[in-house]
Amino acid sequence: MIRSREIFTSDKIAKVILKSASFLVLLLAAGIIFSLLKGSIPAFREFGIFRFIFSSEWNPTEGKEVYGAFPFIFGTVVTSLLALIICFPLSFATSLFISEYFKKTKIAGILSTLVDLLAGIPSIVYGLWGFYTLRPLIVDLGLSEQGYGIFTSSLILAIMIIPYATSLSNEIISMVPNELKEAGYSLGATRLEVIFNVILPVSRSGLVAGYILALGRALGETMAVTMLIGNANLIPKGIFSPGNTMASVIANQFGEADGLKLSALIAIGLLLFVVTAIVNAAGKWIVRRYA
Amino acid sequence: MNLMKSDNRNTPDRSSWRDKKNKLFLGLVVTLSIVTVLPIFLILWKLVKEGISQINLDFFIKVAPDPLEAMTAVNNGEIIPGGIANGITGSLLMVLIASLIAIPVSILAGIFLYEHPNGWYARLIRNLTDILQGVPSIVLGLIAYIWIVISITKGFSGLAGSVALAIMMLPIVIRSTEETMKMIPVTLKEAAAALGVPYWRIILKVMIPTGFSGLMTGILLSISRILGETAPLMLTALGSTMINLNIYKPTSAVPLLIWEFYNNPNMVRLVWSSSLFLMGVVLVLNILAKRINSRFGNNQ
Amino acid sequence: METTNDLRVMTENKMHIEHPALSLRNLSVAYTKDKPAVKGVTADIKRHSITAIMGPSGCGKSTLLRAINRMHDLYPEIVMQGEIRLNGEDVFNMSTTTLRRKIGMVFQRPNPFPTMSVYANVLAGYQLNGFSLKRSEKDEIVEKSLMDVGLFDEVRDSLNKKGTFLSGGQQQRLCVARALALKPEVILADEPTSALDPLSTARIEDLFTELKKNYTIVLVTHNMAQAARISDNAMFMYLGELVEYDRTKTMFTNPKDPRTEGYLTGKFG
Ligand SMILES: Nc1ncnc2c1ncn2[C@@H]1O[C@H](COP(=O)(O)OP(=O)(O)OP(=O)(O)O)[C@@H](O)[C@H]1O
Ligand SMILES: [Mg+2]
């Protein structure tokens, strides 16, 4: 006979309360998906999901309303990927500084605190700084006339996502066993060779996961991008041309939106939600699986 | 390892080149690391330089000036009158409401996850929490708009802003609660159970007090995250020129004011002082959170 | 102590004990399905005595001990089968809270509540349960419990300091005092001295010998000398089974099972 768990009533109540709280997370997630879907339906019904995603037309004129999300999807993907490319050497070097070259020293601690600070700066402050400091620099360099555009946004995004890319890399790199590194050194390898032949192969999937999670951050950034990308509702012609992203078009166009336009913006929000959820899930999956 | 295959690896030429490469790379790492943190100093410097002159008592107790006043002041070369009191009160109000909504639920849900390290349901909740944490804040603005602005307050409102911020806090506090609880030795819980203490009292009287500083750290960090949020508030709280404490009405917030100042050429100088203030508060919260956390570490 | 009369060997490893404080019948505990860590243990535990549980690491001593105050109920995946009676009453019919107030527990590592003072730690059983006491009652309980564990004089001046500031040995005695404060009938102790230095260990041993006048003590120990020194009866467990249960003296001088003999003579364990 299995001895029954006669659970004291108050214990039961406590467990029910805890479980309900956790259930709220489930409800919340379900509610978000449901509301985004429901809000998107008018736009999807009007244009069709496929056309909505792949059309480049964006015309809010009454009577001739057409909304296509492609320029924004394109702009989001391009700015985020470019940001990732710019971020990589910086954050990788920083991780090596903190977790390998100067591991556990005071200076590494300071650097790590400073990098954490980067994550604490509000998006709108990045936007301001980008607008008043970076943008004139781009103009001075003759890269673009106004200084707005994909590249400027990516540059600021790159700085913004560095802390997210670095924190996981730090963890992974500092977890590489000392014996492994020592094996490399004992064969006469230099530090550089140990980094590329021992540390990198072992920590590769963890680093990849870190950059994927950082990409997830970049995809959804709004304010800084809105202030720097130029908000042109078209496919950018080059990396110094203005464009728009999914997040920034929502922020920009929301003020005067109702009806079909609102539905189109919600639909863009849904797409953004799905994309970031997939990217984040992929990153987390790799972390759990390999790192 | 490829260096083992090299025939001439012992010639002085070859090893000095390897040596040089090694040193060059270290130089590169140090340089890039400096470049990485350089923006912090540049940003802080810019904020202080441009913003400090506007920070005075009025800045904290007066509401934002109207554009005309600001223009006159700018034309006369005076400092712009008024301040950000409507933003400060709005931010405080919305953070308070968001905390009231998010913190109790998050702590309970975090304890649930701690109590259930395995099992499909807990794993699902954990994954959903991760997904929630990754949802762009602008999307949460849309959600709060649909849920609150359209359906409940029938108009832009501080409540809608608070809900958007609460959803942002939730996953952060849940995960930090779970991590904090994991750090409490399990024998402490068992010691209380062995004294015949019912489960809910163990949670309230042992687990939460013991992990208090860890929980506080998570809460402070989540508050410092939401304090600077602008995008979701643009879709929900909208902003207000007056101090407003009615959560059913449009409400201002410091980042919303920054956005307004930024868009108005006459008030640009206020942008910097407001940002400096916001940055200062966020910094203090971060430092406080770290302090408390390191004390928690020493306690164990 | 006069123990000879009421001890009668029933079978090879089960002692007959009149009016036992605890009786276990066919008790099994499994962490994972089909792999019980304790298998069908049947034994009576003598009132106001020290019963030692010995055996090699992983044989199920802690698991058995923690079944007695239903500590396993904290972990829903653990399955318990069989019967445990405290003074003849089925513990599975009691609420865990009532049961655990009657059965105190001392852990392997001292675990005073880090947020509480020495004073509050002694009273933790009352405070955490929400029993309100008058100041005078509190003082009395604290003083008596600390006296009982011989700690009162040492901490008289630091009652308001955090319990975690005491030495390891003092902390462990504080934990015993915390258990005693609730006036339990049984004390379960799982290797209570394994984290302590020899002097603190000796103090705890003396304390237990003193306490057994009023309490029934079940003591898990790895230390054979300790079992020999302070226990009246002893169990020897192996791979989850209770291999031998007898008076300690008899077990040490004349073990009946070859496995017990092997363990006691240091052949394994
Ligand atoms: N929480 C648990 N989950 C799964 N298996 C466990 C758990 N705790 C113990 N076990 C297993 O149950 C068996 C008995 O463990 P138990 O802790 O009771 O042994 P023990 O005799 O107290 O050992 P020790 O002398 O090392 O403390 C062991 O095989 C152990 O691996
Ligand atoms: Mg044990």
Image: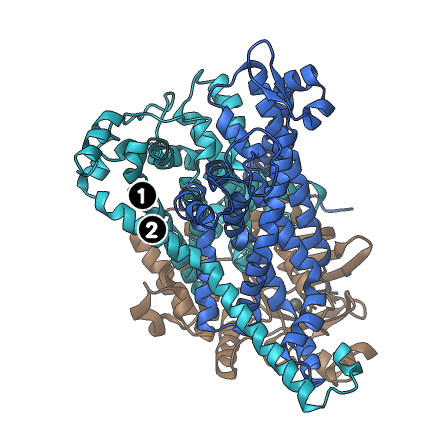
Chain colours: A blue, B cyan, C brown
Across and down, in percent, residue B125 comes to 64, 40
Question: Neighbour class for label 2 at 10 Å: few (<14), some, many (≥20)?
Answer: some
Query: Relative to A279, is B292 above or below?
Result: below
Q: Find numbered disc 2 in the image and state the secondary structure of the residue it sits on.
A: helix
Task: Look at the image and tell me whether residue C90 can be seen.
Answer: no
Q: Residue at x 68, y 73 (%)?
A: C234
Chain under callout 1: B
Residue at screen point 41% across, 41% down: B228
Q: Amino acid at mark 2?
A: Lys
Tell me, yes or no, whether the two marked residues, 1 and 2, touch with CB atoms within 8 Å: yes
Q: Is residue B53 left or right of residue B153?
A: left
User: For the residues marked 1 and 2, what is the alpha-carbon distance in whole angstroms?
Assistant: 8 Å
> Residue A229 location in percent, x, y?
51, 38
* Residue beneath disc 2: B46
Task: Indicate the quadrant of ligand 2 in the picture.
Answer: bottom right
Task: Say whether mark 2 and mark 1 are on the same chain.
Answer: yes
For the point 77% across and 54% down, which residue is it? C32
Indicate the quadrant containing the C terminus of chain C: top left, top right, bottom left or bottom right: bottom right
Please tell me which residue is depicted at 54% across the width and 27% down the height of the picture: B143
Q: Earlier in the sequence, mark 1 or mark 2?
A: 2
Tell me the element at label 1: helix
Q: Which residue is mark 1?
A: B272
Q: Quadrant of residue B225?
A: top left
> What's under tag 1, amino acid-wise?
Trp
Instruction: Tell me the tag on residue C73.
Output: none
Q: Is residue A105 above or below residue C38?
A: below
State the quadrant of the N terminus of chain C: bottom right
Q: Nearer the viewer, residue C166 or A163?
A: A163
Q: Position of residue C79 (x, y in %)?
A: 73, 50
Q: Which percent across, then down, holds residue A134?
A: 44, 48
